[in-house]
């Protein structure tokens, strides 16, 4: 499938430092104003404090938070590799080497990079961290992990036929009987940024992207392309996403007359849906991408994860930063006619939420967001994207 120029120019960006991919600085841009430089310095200070906290909270054998979730170690490593000044790409200190040694030690004969469970999540994020290291020695591990992820794409019913609403997506692993938006997003991301490693290989060895896009459609509240019974006709849901066909973390609304349940769209997974479409290389002007972007603009807020309140708030911030950066969006047009420079607004929100010790954590523990390693990584990575493109 041909790469669209508006996503990211050049396959090499797929493994730039810290996956600076999520927005390399614009070459030839006008010199930054004193106000811009001042604000970027504030962001840099927040990033540096977050990185110091992460450095001080690494376990002695290399992992962060839990040895059973190598994805958390991978996210911490991505934070250091994405540090805007390139401090951790010019040289690799011993604590980062220990982190990478831990990740490599989690690689399994099947190609996955995991301890026991959550094989998609752990493998995909570990691949991203290994790509960010830009070490040829890691390429065999990355290639094998890539084949593993491709093999996780769901195909129920007749092979190579889209005869099931879950077909084309990716789930937690073989024992789970459904795909979901979270795992599909992580898989698409890792495959997108590692695609330069298989550019000379036959297409049949890669993901079935048409099937992946069909799965994404099957999770979108867009009646003209998705005729499942749960799809909402409420304009407040139009264009947004649910977690997987027939299930929304935000619940649904029951029609008292018919008993029909219409599922609600919600913020974090709608940003995930937009980003997944981009990684599947749909154009920004595709009607499916435009529909979810319209929903996100109408429901813009930094006070909650729309539809979920405080649950998954930092994943919402993180995925927002990724999606809007990859789509090269600088300004959002809100439902009331106002426009918002989302980068400054989000950066200020994150800096104001940073703890005195440099970490971040959510008071609500849904999706592990009381874990300061996970949430600090979400915040630092978002700030690094903003700093790089502000």
Image (cartoon, rainbow, N blue to C red):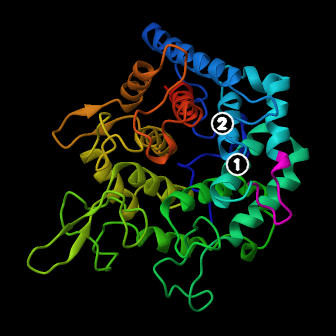
Query: Residue 346: which numbered mark, if any?
Result: none
Q: Please determine whether, in this image, residue 209 is positioned above or below residue 286.
A: below
Please give left or right for residue 383 compared with residue 337 in the image.
right
Label 1 crowd bin: few (<14), some (14–19), many (20+), radius 10 Å: some
Give the image location of residue 201, x and y in percent.
80, 68
Quadrant of the rendered structure where residue 22 is? top right
Please give left or right for residue 199 compared with residue 7 in the image.
right
Q: Is residue 171 visible?
A: yes
Question: What residue do we see at 71% from left, 46% from top?
Answer: 70
Q: Residue furthest left?
A: 257
Quadrant of the rendered structure where residue 67 is? top right
Question: What residue do we see at 67% from left, 48% from top?
Answer: 125
Badge 2 marks a residue whose secondary structure is loop
Quadrant in which the N terminus appears: bottom right
Q: Please determine whether, in this image, residue 328 is positioned above or below residue 272.
A: above
Please give left or right for residue 331 compared with residue 136 in the image.
left
Question: Is 112 part of what is drawn in magenta?
Answer: yes
Q: How many marks?
A: 2
Question: Is 240 part of what is drawn in magenta?
Answer: no
Which stretch appears magenta?
A: 104-114
Label 2 crowd bin: few (<14), some (14–19), many (20+), radius 10 Å: some
Q: Main secondary structure of the magenta part?
A: loop
Badge 1 marks a residue whose secondary structure is loop
Residue corresponding to mark 1: 68
The front one of 185 and 207 is: 185
Q: Please determine whether, in this image, residue 290 is positioned above or below residue 325.
A: below
Give the image location of residue 17, x and y in percent.
72, 34
The front one of 317 and 313 is: 313
Residue corresponding to mark 2: 65
């Amino acid at each position: 499938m041909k790469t669209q120029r508006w996503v990211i120019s050049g396959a090499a960006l797929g493994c730039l430092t810290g996956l600076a991919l999520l927005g390399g600085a614009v070459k030839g841009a006008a010199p930054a104003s004193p106000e811009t430089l001042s604000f970027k310095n504030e962001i840099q200070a927040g990033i540096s404090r977050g990185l110091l906290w992460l450095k001080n909270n690494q376990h002695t054998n290399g992992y962060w938070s839990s040895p059973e979730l190598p994805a958390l170690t991978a996210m911490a490593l991505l934070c250091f590799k994405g540090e805007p000044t390139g401090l951790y790409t010019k040289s690799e200190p011993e604590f980062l080497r220990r982190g990478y040694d831990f990740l490599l030690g989690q690689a399994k004969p099947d190609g996955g990079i995991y301890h026991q469970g959550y094989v998609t999540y752990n493998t995909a994020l570990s691949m991203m961290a290994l790509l960010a290291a830009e070490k040829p020695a890691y390429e065999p591990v990355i290639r094998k992990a890539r084949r593993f992820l491709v093999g996780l794409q769901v195909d129920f019913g007749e092979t190579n036929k889209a005869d099931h609403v879950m077909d084309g997506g990716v789930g937690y692993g073989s024992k789970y009987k459904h795909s979901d938006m979270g795992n599909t997003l992580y898989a698409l991301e890792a495959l997108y940024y590692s695609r330069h490693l298989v550019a000379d290989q036959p297409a049949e060895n890669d993901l079935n992207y048409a099937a992946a896009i069909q799965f994404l459609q099957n999770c979108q509240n867009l009646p003209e392309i998705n005729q499942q019974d749960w799809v909402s006709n409420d304009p407040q849901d139009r264009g947004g996403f649910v977690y997987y066909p027939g299930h929304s973390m935000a619940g649904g609304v029951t029609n008292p007359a018919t008993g029909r349940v219409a599922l609600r769209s919600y913020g974090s997974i709608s940003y995930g849906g937009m980003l997944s479409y981009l990684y599947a290389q749909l154009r920004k002007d595709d009607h499916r991408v435009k529909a979810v972007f319209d929903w996100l603009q109408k429901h813009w807020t930094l006070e909650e994860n729309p539809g979920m309140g405080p649950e998954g708030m930092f994943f919402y911030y993180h995925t927002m930063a990724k999606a809007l950066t990859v789509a090269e969006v600088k300004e959002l047009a809100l439902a009331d006619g106002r426009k918002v420079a989302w980068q400054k607004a989000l950066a200020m929100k994150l800096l104001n939420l940073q703890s005195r010790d440099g970490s971040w954590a959510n008071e609500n523990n849904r999706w592990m967001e009381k874990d300061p390693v996970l949430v600090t990584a979400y915040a630092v990575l978002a700030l690094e994207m903003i700093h790089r493109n502000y």
